[in-house]
Amino acid sequence: MTSSAEGTNLPGYYDYYKTPVKLVPTPDGGLTAWRLDKKTGGWRPANDIVDEIISAIGGEVFVRTSAQFVQRTEAERGRYLKGEGPIFALYETVKAIDDVAIAERRPYTPEEAALITGIRRRTFVMFEEQLQQAGDPGADPTIATAAP
């Protein structure tokens, strides 16, 4: 199922009740929504919330840039997913930096913030490429390369 893309800037990136959601154009001129599945890290269809997202900006729906979307998606994946391999090693690196800042009760240094941003951009591409190879129709690693 797709909704009309008329009047909606696509692609669109959102936080919907603290979960990353993206609205993307379809070949027929419509749009489709994908919501992050925190159990798998993949994307599940979310067309049932399109109208709420488009009409209810504010409250529990927030517009995000592509760069913010990439960072939020990877923060959620790093928080909820466990596993082996290079992606999970990078998630652990971010967690270690985060743990130190929390223990020292301070914000990230500029260097730590830049490192986390770079790692999350990299893990986003890696994860999305794996999802694409597995046939996830919502996967799109190019979002991270388009992000400023």
Image (cartoon, rainbow, N blue to C red):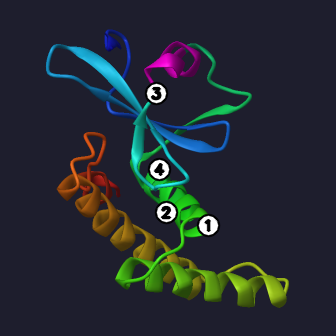
Query: In this rendering, which labeled residue sits more in front, label 2 or label 4?
Result: 2
**Is-magenta flag for residue 45?**
no
Which residue position is annotated with label 1?
79
Instruction: Determine the image quadrant of residue 88.
Output: bottom left
Q: Secondary structure at mark 2?
A: helix
Which residue position is annotated with label 4?
69
Q: Residue at x 21, y 48 (%)?
A: 135
| Crowd around label 4: few <14 · some 14–19 · many ≥20 (10 Å) | many
Q: Position of residue 67 (x, y in %)?
A: 42, 55
User: Upstream in the sequence, badge 4 or badge 1?
Assistant: 4
| Quadrant of the drawing holding the N terminus | top left
Q: In the picture shown, does residue 118 fall above or below 25? A: below
Label 4 vs label 3: CA separation? 16 Å
Which residue position is annotated with label 3?
46
Which residue type carries mark 2? Glu
Q: Residue at x 55, y 22 (%)?
A: 53
Query: In this rendering, which labeled residue sits more in front, label 3 or label 2?
Result: 3
Residues in magenta, as a range = 46-54
Label 3 vs label 2: CA separation? 19 Å
Query: In this rendering, which labeled residue sits more in front, label 4 or label 1?
Result: 1
Q: Position of residue 129 (x, y in %)?
A: 23, 61
User: Upstream in the sequence, badge 2 or badge 1?
Assistant: 2
Point out which mark residue 74 bears: 2
| Quadrant of the drawing holding the C terminus | bottom left
Res 23 visible: yes
